[in-house]
Image (tube, helix red, strand yellow):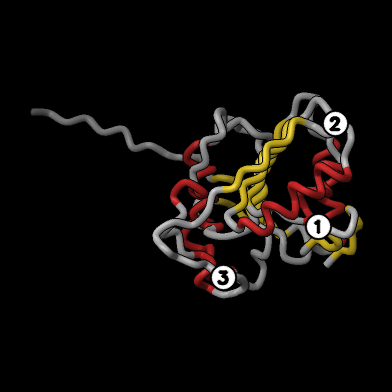
């Protein structure tokens, strides 16, 4: 956990310092019109904004209204020149509560709109998957992403591999921080068959 100070609203990020360093270096290497999409708003959202150019874009998707409100307040109060920031609140549906730090957090039921948000072009340079239903969000990225050079991450991967393996099996996984994994999609191989009728 990294201590940060965005007023008294956001005071920590649930990331290791090695993860913050890795991600901020990558963010700074994005093109001037680069885009990042994040699932799970929080202290990390403020760190990303702090390291982005005003010409870059950040879309952050959050299911929890309290966290969404806190991050929105921190962004409004702390940042004067920000990149193009969109903070989306997409709550759980059907009375389902996902919780945190337990396998129930991975349940994709009740969060179809969160997993597949209406964000326009899926052409981000970076996809950072934190929050709930991470494996399902990974599958959404693998399905929709239009940028073959995109960097895709799942936070808290290390130590929770069985939670994500049904989706991460379609990628090569590299641990790049305390728990952070970078995923490289395996190329799809199509079988060409000819049918004689």
Contact flag, marks 3 and 2 (Cβ < 8 Å): no
Q: Which residue is mark 2?
A: 53
Q: Residue furthest left?
A: 197
In the image, residue 105 lies at what x, y percent? 54, 67
Give the Cα separation between the discs numbered 3 and 2: 34 Å
Q: Nearer the viewer, residue 25 or 111?
A: 111
Q: Seen in the image, is 144 located left or right of residue 158? A: left
Give how far across and how far down residue 175 sits, in percent. Answer: 71, 60
Ranked by sequence position, the earlier of labels 1 and 3 is 1
Q: Quadrant of residue 55?
A: top right
Question: Residue 130 falls in which quadrant of the image?
Answer: bottom right
- Looking at the rendered image, the disc whose residue lies closer to the viewer, 1 or 2, is 2
The answer for how far apart the CA atoms under marks 1 and 2 are is 20 Å
Task: Name the mark on residue 19.
Answer: 1
In this rendering, the label closer to the viewer, 3 or 2: 3
N-terminal-most mark, 3 or 2:
2
> Which residue carries the number 3 mark?
99
Q: In terms of depth relative to the viewer, which is nearer, 99 or 94? A: 94
Q: Residue at x 62, y 56 (%)?
A: 65
Element class at badge 3: loop
């Amino acid at each position: 956990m990294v201590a940060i100070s965005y007023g008294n609203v956001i005071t920590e990020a649930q990331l290791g310092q090695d993860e913050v360093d890795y991600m901020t270096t990558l963010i700074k290497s994005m093109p001037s019109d680069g885009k990042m999409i994040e699932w799970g708003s929080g202290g990390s959202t403020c760190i990303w904004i702090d390291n982005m150019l005003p010409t870059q874009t950040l879309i952050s998707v959050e299911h929890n209204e309290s966290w969404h409100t806190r991050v929105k307040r921190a962004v409004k109060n702390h940042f004067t020149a920000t990149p193009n920031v969109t903070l989306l609140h997409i709550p759980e549906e059907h009375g389902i509560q996902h919780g945190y730090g337990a396998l129930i957090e991975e349940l994709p039921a009740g969060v179809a709109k969160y997993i597949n948000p209406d964000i326009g072009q899926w052409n981000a340079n970076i996809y950072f998957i934190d929050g709930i239903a991470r494996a399902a969000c990974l599958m959404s990225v693998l399905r929709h992403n239009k940028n073959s050079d995109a960097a895709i991450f799942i936070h808290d991967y290390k130590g929770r591999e069985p939670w994500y393996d049904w989706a991460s099996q379609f990628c090569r996984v590299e641990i790049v921080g305390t728990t952070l994994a970078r995923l490289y999609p395996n190329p799809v191989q199509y079988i060409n068959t000819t049918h004689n009728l």
